[in-house]
Image (cartoon, helix red, strand yellow):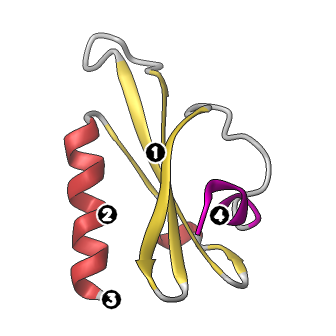
């Protein structure tokens, strides 16, 4: 699946994490968007990373999360893949 196909599941821009890093699959019917933006609390981290999760029905708020590091965000994506 290319980025255009993933974008159909993620409508609009996230106010905090506006810069898209990548889209990908969690499972056959769940997808993620990894993004970042400037942290509102720069003393803890320069950037904040967001992981948005959607399925074919739309955005899944309960599985989406934010992190202070890209590694933590990627670890979360990998955890969701293992649990799928």
Magenta stretch in the rendered image? 1-8
- SS type, badge 1: strand
Q: Earlier in the sequence, mark 3 or mark 4?
A: 4
- SS type, badge 3: loop
Front: mark 4 or 2: 4
How packed mark 1 is, by other alpha carbons closer than 10 Å (few <14, some 14-19, many 20 or more), is many
Q: Which residue is mark 4?
A: 6
Q: Earlier in the sequence, mark 1 or mark 4?
A: 4
Q: Are marks 4 and 2 in contact (CB under 8 Å)?
A: no
Q: Which residue is mark 3?
A: 84
Rendered position, 24 above or below 28:
above
Q: Are marks 1 and 2 in contact (CB under 8 Å)?
A: no
Query: Which residue extends farthest front?
Result: 2
The structure residue drawn at horizontal position 48% and vertical position 88%, both measured from the top left corner, is: 28
Q: Using the numbered discs, state the Cα–Cα distance from disc 3 to disc 4 in whole angstroms.
A: 18 Å
- SS type, badge 4: helix
How packed mark 2 is, by other alpha carbons closer than 10 Å (few <14, some 14-19, many 20 or more), is many
Whole-percent x and y of residue 11? 78, 56
Q: Which residue is mark 1?
A: 50
Q: Which residue is mark 2?
A: 77
Q: Earlier in the sequence, mark 1 or mark 2?
A: 1
Q: Earlier in the sequence, mark 4 or mark 2?
A: 4
Picture mark count: 4
Whole-percent x and y of residue 57? 73, 84
The structure residue drawn at horizontal position 47% and vertical position 19%, both measured from the top left corner, is: 40
The structure residue drawn at horizontal position 24% and vertical position 67%, both measured from the top left corner, is: 78
The structure residue drawn at horizontal position 58% and vertical position 69%, both measured from the top left corner, is: 1
Q: Using the numbered discs, state the Cα–Cα distance from disc 3 to disc 1 in whole angstroms.
A: 20 Å
Front: mark 1 or 2: 2
Rendered position, 47 above or below 54:
above
Q: Give yes or no for residue 9 being in the magenta stretch.
A: no
């Amino acid at each position: 699946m290319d980025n255009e196909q993933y974008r159909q599941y993620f409508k609009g821009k996230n106010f905090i994490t506006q810069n898209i890093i990548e889209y990908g699959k969690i499972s056959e019917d769940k997808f993620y968007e990894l993004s970042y933006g400037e942290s509102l609390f720069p003393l803890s981290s320069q950037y904040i990373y967001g992981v948005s999760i959607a399925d074919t029905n739309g955005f899944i708020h309960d599985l989406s999360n934010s992190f202070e590091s890209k590694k933590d965000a990627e670890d979360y994506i990998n955890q969701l893949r293992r649990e799928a």
